[in-house]
Each structure stands twice: as structure tokens, then as C-alpha cells.
Amino acid sequence: MRRVWTQEETTYLKDNWGTISVKTIAKTLNRSEGSVLSKRDKLKLGAFLESGDYITLNQLMKVVGYPVCGQAVKVWVDREIPTINKKVNNSNFKAVRINEFWKWAEKNQEILDFSRLERYILGKEPEWVEVKRQKDIINKPYRRRLWTKSEDERLIFLLSQYKYNCTEVAKKMQRSEDSIRNRLHRLNIKTRPVIKNIKNTQRWTKEEMNTLKELIKKGDDYKTIQSFIPNRTVKSLRTKVYTIYGTGNLEKVRKEGDRND
């Protein structure tokens, strides 16, 4: 039986038509792309922006997680974000071709924060995007936010696997470890994350050493490095760096490396 469009669905379609792809609209509304296009025709919303190849600059900034304000827009424009002028009906606005955005973003990673960029919301992503997203999630202070029912269910599910420690659960939930502990206490959940005995006295492997040196050279901090070498604590990483370079200050290590190159 054909599902009747609700007022909320119709409003959503009107508000987002010409700014995000048909595929994303259909997914959000749990409808087929054909249904969305049919409703578009009935509402006479006009042609979509190149079948989803384009997105408005304002909508793009919202999707990535930035406020659409003068200062934020200025930063992107000053970095020469490739925009074009588009028109739908009588409205003119700046738009960005998605594949051009990825090329620009890769060159401007230092000014971007992908921690709130929903995976695949812009379609297929270059391989480097997920690495950037995880790095930003690790380095970004977790904002205080209310727990949802789905998060509680996911937390309980992760604990039921009996294989994740608190650090791993926090990373998967994109929350701090204190937030995880407090939630377990509030929900009166008796199951706890597993405790893994990390033997930092074990001999470092050649692979670990190469990874450590490469990430230091890349500019990562201890917390990020630890996420790529999970069998080592931040303290053991700092000790190893001091042993190798005579200092635990990563900036000094990098400067010495630059002078020796």
C-alpha cells in the first residue's frame, strides 16, 4: 500500500531540495528515490542540482558541522574553496561540486574538523577521510550531551560482547571514559568493560617502532599515536620516545628530525 506523505516529510523535502542529494533525502525519509522525485514533481520544486553532484556552500558547512556565519564562511573562502553560482527557480546561491570539495579538503585538513561529519552523508568518501574523522574524534574534547535510548542500547550491547575495555567502548561511543562510567552507574548496569592486562614490558616490534616514528614525523600527538599502537599506553609511548631521542617532547623530536633531513 502506498504510504501517504506527511506534512513533516513534505516540509523536509521543500527545505532541503537543491541542497542535499536525492539519495540522502530518500534515506532520511525512508522512501525510494522514485517516490522523492515524484513528490518533487507534484510540488514543482524545479530541477535538482546536477542530480546531486552539487551542494550549496551553506548546506555543505552544516553537513561538515560548522555554523554558517560570516567568520566560518570567510575562512573557507580565504582558502579558496571552489564554488560556482547556481540558480534554482528565482534563488541564486553558491554551490560546490562534491568531488572538488574532497580535493580541496585534503589540501586543507589542518583547518577542518571531521569529528561530526556523518559517514557517507556526501556519498562515497576518499580513503583519507575516515582516518581524518577518527583522528578528529580522538583529539576533540567530548561535548556534554544527553544520552539517547539508542546509545544506551548500544552501550549494553558492547558490554555484552565481553571483549572491549573502557577506552575501546568510549571510542566506539564517541564519549569520554568518565561519561561511560557515569552512565553505567546511572543505569545501574552491573556488567563492566573488560580489563585488559597490557604488558608494556614486552619487546617492541619493528612494526610498532616504524609506526611510532612515522606518526611522530606526521605531526600526531601521543593520544593519536596510542590509537594506532593500542598495546601501548601513552606513558609507555612517552618513555620509548625519551629513550630513543633523549626527550619526550614531540615538537623537539620533529625539529631535530627536520634539521637532520
Image (tube, grey):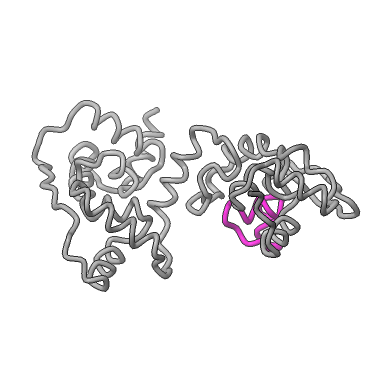
- Pick the residue in front: 246 or 112: 112
Give coordinates of residue 102: x percent, y percent: 61, 37
Examine the residues drawn in magenta and state their main secondary structure. Answer: helix
Q: Give, as a single range, the part of the protein colored magenta.
A: 57-78
Q: Is residue 16 above or below residue 108?
A: below
Place residue 206 in its image quadrant. Answer: top left
**Where is the C terminus found, in terms of image quarters?**
top left
Q: Is residue 187 above or below residue 21?
A: below
State the residue lying farthest toward the front.
1
Image side of residue 167 versus residue 10, left or right? left
Residue displayed at 13% across by 45% down: 198
Give coordinates of residue 5: x percent, y percent: 69, 57
State the residue lying farthest toward the bottom.
186
Image side of residue 114 versus residue 24, left or right? left
Place residue 192 in its image quadrant. Answer: bottom left
- Pick the residue in front: 239 or 234: 234
Please tell me how many numbered marks the rendered image carries. Answer: 0
Place residue 200 in its image quadrant. Answer: top left
State the residue lying farthest toward the right.
90
Q: Is residue 139 magenta?
A: no
Image side of residue 137 versus residue 24, left or right? left
Give coordinates of residue 143: x percent, y percent: 43, 65
Q: Is residue 58 magenta?
A: yes
Residue displayed at 50% across by 39% down: 129
Give coordinates of residue 56: x percent, y percent: 73, 49
Residue displayed at 48% across by 52% down: 115
